[in-house]
Image (cartoon, rainbow, N blue to C red):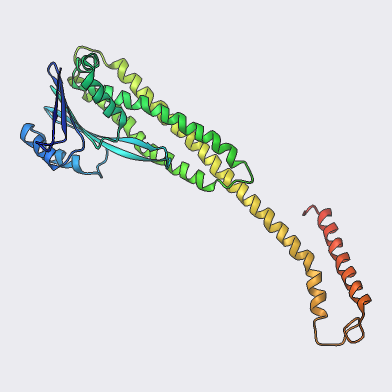
Amino acid sequence: MAVTQMGKEEQLNIETITWGNLTWINIQPPTKREIEYLVKNFSFHRLDLDDVLSRTQRPKIDEYSDYLFVILHFQIYDKVTRVSTHSQVSVFVGENYLITLHEGELRPLVTLFKECQINETSCKEYFSHGSGYLLYRILDRTADAYFSILDKIRRLMEEMEDRVFDPHIETAQEVAIMRRDIITQRRILFPMRTQVIDLESKLTRYIKKIDMGVYWGDLVDHFNKICESLDEIKETIEVYKDAAFVLGTERLNHIMRMLTVLGTILLPFVVVSSVYGMNVILPGGLENGSYHSFIILLVVMAAIAVGMLYFFHCRRWI
């Protein structure tokens, strides 16, 4: 096994691992200098090399006579913001090489490369069946790592369920953030499942001495489970969203009902005080009035309010 790292003297972010006839070239992160290195040493199409530096590329698979160019989008989950983003990985697959170009955000890929650097047994296991098998192991590692993220999302969902149905906690914003994140993950991982199915047939010529049918079936099954889990979580989030909306509307209606009842009860006070606020002589007014008339007015208004409360209670409005 040979491990090579191009350091600062060459100003290239390139590391290589060679075992047998297969070389894994890892470029992290790719810049114009690394692209020029690939131009000088490989016969890749210039448009493919331009796509490597672009961050707006859609996932795709381009097949040529002597190599395969693949752009993959992987999901990166931020534990703090609980928001997912995509990380682009460009891959060139040839007969005797595998070239990965990425920003170093995908932990399973970085970990696998470091493992092959320090562990010759792992290197032998991953490199002995060709570049196509090595790419399969990268995809398999990524799929396995995502299940832990799904477990965290499910735990957040359980916590959110208790909060959504608690009338004293506002959860509309939390539900909206979770819903946006699930939509983002679906947008990233659903095309990934399609790519894995397509890669099964295209990578056959780069895999040696092993029947990959069962392996690809297992990998596709993993992505199917992931996508089905995301569908289930999305449906649950929609239920939480509707529940938060209904409960919020119910709380608002309750508040408006109480305010309306309160305003209706105070209406007699307003009417009587308005009448006696007019600049005319009225029975019980200031010119011929006394404290007895004032007390009588209060009793009359209170009686009207109590009568209205009883009427509302009988109609089950309160």
**So how many labels did they put on this image?**
0
Q: Is residue 150 left or right of residue 271?
A: left
Q: In this view, does 263 lie above or below 84?
A: below
* Quarter of the image that includes the N terminus: top left
Q: 92 or 60: which is nearer to us?
A: 92
Residue 184: give x, y in percent of width and height. 39, 41
**Going by the picture, which residue comes out furthest to the front?**
9
Residue 126: give x, y in percent of width and height. 23, 18
In the rendered image, is residue 281 in sight? yes
Q: Is residue 92 left or right of residue 219?
A: left
Q: Which residue is drawn at 46% across and 29% down?
A: 151
Q: In which quarter of the image is residue 22?
A: top left
Q: Residue at x 88, y 65 (%)?
A: 303
In the rendered image, is residue 133 in sight? no
Q: Which residue is drawn at 27% across and 22% down?
A: 137
Q: 255 or 58: which is nearer to us?
A: 255
Q: 156 or 63: which is nearer to us?
A: 156
Q: Is residue 296 above or below residue 289?
A: above
Q: Quadrant of residue 45?
A: top left
Q: In which quarter of the image is residue 130?
A: top left
Q: Which residue is drawn at 91% across and 77% down?
A: 291
**Going by the picture, which residue comes out furthest to the left?**
40
**Going by the picture, which residue comes out furthest to the top?**
209
Residue 27: give x, y in percent of width and height. 18, 33
Q: In this view, does 61 lie to the left or right of 82?
A: left
Residue 166: give x, y in percent of width and height. 63, 42
